């Protein structure tokens, strides 16, 4: 199995030329506010970064706490977040999540995986990102489709879905890199190692990459 460390070191330098992913930027702009990181991550699923950023900005301009957002009707949230993917379902999940944060967690975004996963529309990807960005967890790897795809292309894992990839990565990536795997591979996936036509000729890790499954 190729060693992930040399690749991660090269990517850490190479990604500096690009903008950070939308949720990372929102995390920095909001001083790691767990609520806005949670909501932005929910909106980001299967949605381009520019759309996530704009939708999050519109929604947070109207409401930026669970209490104020829970008062919005789903139809209003829908209009604010359109055109994120699955905006109708996400609007319902966002409001219900706000209500449950108020009723079950005293208005605070929970800080454990188990509790986060009980919120509507919150899966492991969202929970891991909230734990990493807003609760400073060093014990999580956040795996989305970019991380899943690139970890397989690099030959670090041989897995069928992001959940399998997450558990496999805990075994092969040194712990000190866990919180940063998502930032490095998502930025690489958006700009170089794209789902279709990856730019292998312009890739700084091409000599370390077996390009598993790349045609
Ligand atoms: S060499 Fe190609 S497949 Fe491998 S990481 Fe770079 S862009 Fe992706």
Image: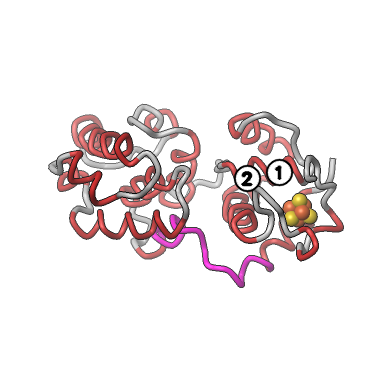
Q: Position of residue 85 (x, y in %)?
A: 40, 43
Residue 112 lies in what quarter of the image?
top left
Q: Position of residue 84 (x, y in %)?
A: 37, 48
Q: How is the image coloured?
A: secondary structure
Q: CA distance from mark 1 to mark 2?
A: 6 Å
Q: Nearer the viewer, residue 142 or 52?
A: 52
**Marks 1,2: beta carbons within 8 A:** yes
User: Magenta segment, which residues?
Assistant: 14-27
Element type at marker 2? Answer: helix
Q: Is mark 1 within 8 Å of ligand 1?
A: no
Q: Residue at x 37, y 65 (%)?
A: 29
- Classify 189 as above or below 106: below
Q: Residues within 10 Å of mark 1 (few under 14, many from 20)?
A: many
Q: Is mark 2 within 8 Å of ligand 1?
A: no
Q: Is residue 6 left or right of residue 126?
A: right
User: Residue tagged by mark 2?
Assistant: 147
Q: Residue at x 23, y 38 (%)?
A: 95
User: Residue tagged by mark 1?
Assistant: 151
Q: Is residue 18 magenta?
A: yes
Q: Indicate the quadrant containing the N terminus: top left, top right, bottom left or bottom right.
A: top right
**Residue 5 in view in this figure:** no
Q: Nearer the viewer, residue 102 or 19?
A: 19
Q: Position of residue 80 (x, y in %)?
A: 24, 51
């Amino acid at each position: 199995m190729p060693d992930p460390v040399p690749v991660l070191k090269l990517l850490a330098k190479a990604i500096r030329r690009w903008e950070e992913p939308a949720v990372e930027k929102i995390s920095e702009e909001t001083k790691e506010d767990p609520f806005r990181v949670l909501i932005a991550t929910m909106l980001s699923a299967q949605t381009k970064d520019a759309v996530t950023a704009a939708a999050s900005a519109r929604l947070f301009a109207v409401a930026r706490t669970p209490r104020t957002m829970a008062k919005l009707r789903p139809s209003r949230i829908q209009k604010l977040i359109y055109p994120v993917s699955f905006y109708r379902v996400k609007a319902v999940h966002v409001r219900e999540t706000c209500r449950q944060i108020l009723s079950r967690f005293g208005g605070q975004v929970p800080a454990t995986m188990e509790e986060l996963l009980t919120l509507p529309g919150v899966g492991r990807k969202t929970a891991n990102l909230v734990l990493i960005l807003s609760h400073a967890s060093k014990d999580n790897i956040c795996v989305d489709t970019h991380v899943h795809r690139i970890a397989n292309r690099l030959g670090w894992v041989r897995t069928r879905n992001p959940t399998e990839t997450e558990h496999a990565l805990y075994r092969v990536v040194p712990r000190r890199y866990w919180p940063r795997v998502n930032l490095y591979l998502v930025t690489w996936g958006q700009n170089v190692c794209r789902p279709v036509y990856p730019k292998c000729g312009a890739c700084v890790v091409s000599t370390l990459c077996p390009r598993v499954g790349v045609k």
